[in-house]
Amino acid sequence: MKNKLLLALFCAITGTPLYAQSITTFAGNGSTSDSPDGTVVSAAAIGKPQNITWDRFSNCYFYTNGKIRKINASGVIATITNSSASGTAYSGDGGSSTAAGIDPSGLTCDADGNIYICDYSNNRVRKVNAATGVITTVVGNGSPRSASGPSGDGGPATAASLLRPNAVAFDHAGTMYISDQFSIRRIDASGTITTIAGQFNVQGYTGDGGPATAATIGLIYCIASDSHNNIYIYSHHNATENEIRKIDAATGVITTVAGGGTDAIADGASATGIKLGTGSGMFTITPADEILFAVAADARVMKINASGTITTVSGNGTASYCGDGGPASAACLGTIFGLAFDNCYDLYIADFSNSRIRKIDFDTPCPPAAVSPVVTKQAGLLLTPNPATGTVAVIFEHITTLTITDMIGKTHYAATLPGINSTQVDISMLPPGVYSLMVNGTATARLLKQ
């Protein structure tokens, strides 16, 4: 097992709170081997899955046994990179990703379905073009960054020095965030890199309530973003302590949202009062901007709600494999090395020690069209097409109000309707970007305007 291979996930969706339903096995049969490309996932062996993520085209990606593999919307497995064959020494830019030398760690996808991979020991972030399969470097010049050397801040990301990046994520605006030793760096749309948190060569846990650029943070396991573009990091600052911290998008102030206390992790506990210990560092953000995190000590997935209270989502405390077809909270899980939501907002768990990917269904099954990139569904709210350029159909039972706001809360569209079940909304006047569409003041879904 590579202990540096950790989830980095962009989870930029909005919605209503999640309540766990049944759990099933999505992929894997318990074997630690790898089934060949072209195998249907229901019959496949997937090794030891880690770092799971989804693109908006209903493709699932994960790391296992030296490979990054893809499960497409039809449930067929393919290989994206193969370090077990190509090696981990840097090579292959401009060619097929399957022939590249790469040392993969965290991974995520952008809005176009391209895959971004932290190339850990090669001090780079690589991109695999979803359409062509060609791999390129998008961050890092390959030279390991040193405490006395230049950071590259303010210049092109491809010219910057990095040291062992292992987490990558995007926010709603399409801005990339990566880990760089004990700091977080941002790459904007122009490709310029800057440091937004931490001190590159100082590991610690200081600075809460002040600017993130002045804080010290630990080894960064995972990065995620919420619907307001706030950045969350799961870090490890000493041999016994983890914490989840938040960087406010508007102010740049860093605070702790979980960990730092002495209490045991238990239902009803306050997140800031618990001791997170030294778990796997896996977490993600729910559609309602709640935090889900893995608890290594008793094989559970826990949720932190808006008030900071912890509850169990999945796992009965027994590290084993059981419970498929029953309630998620009664199931047995193993060591968790990845958490991610798909396009229908169901949760997927990289159940590493059980050699499986488990699925928790939080809502009614998606309609067949939802496996394509043109439908968004959340709690019964359907948008199609999505992304859209002109008119989008909004389908929901008894629509009385409908609003569209941008990611800073500015309202661009508002309407009162007579309790109808569908309507067409002209969004051609909206600038391209990510918006939140709300129906009846409760049901919310992300709308992409192209």
Image (cartoon, grey):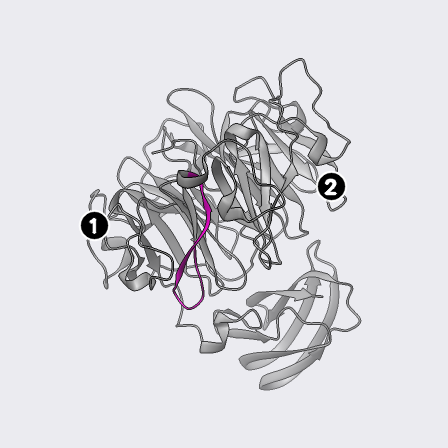
Q: What is the x, y in percent for residue 336?
A: 33, 43
Residue under the image location 62 percent in, 75 percent down: 385
Circles 2, 1 touching at the beta carbon (< 8 Å): no
| Residue depth check, mark 2 versus mark 1: number of the one nearer the observer | 2
Q: Earlier in the sequence, mark 2 or mark 1?
A: 2
Q: Quadrant of the C terminus?
A: bottom right
Which of 70 and 401 lies nearest the eye of the viewer? 70
* Magenta span includes 82: yes
Is residue 368 at all visible to an observer of this figure?
yes
Residue 321: give its label: 1
Instruction: Give yes or no for residue 168 being in the magenta stretch.
Output: no
Relative to 441, 362 lies left or right: left
- Give the image quarter of residue 133: bottom right
* Disc 1: CA contacts within 10 A as few (<14), some (14-19) or many (>=20): some
Left or right: 138 as drawn, with respect to 99: right
Tell me the SS state at disc 1: loop
Residue at image x 51%, y 57%? 287
Q: CA distance from mark 2 to mark 1?
A: 44 Å
Q: Which residues are magenta?
A: 70-83
Q: Position of residue 196 (x, y in %)?
A: 67, 32
Q: Is residue 345 above or below residue 212?
A: below
Q: Position of residue 285 (x, y in %)?
A: 49, 49
Rendered location of residue 206, percent (x, y): 56, 21
- The answer to whether residue 269 is left or right of residue 57 is left
Q: Is residue 210 visible?
A: no
Q: Amino acid at mark 1?
A: Tyr
Q: Secondary structure at mark 2?
A: loop
Tag 2 residue = 191
Q: Quadrant of residue 264?
A: top left
Residue shown at the point (55%, 33%) measured from the top left: 90
The amino acid type, in three-letter code, at marker 2 is Gly
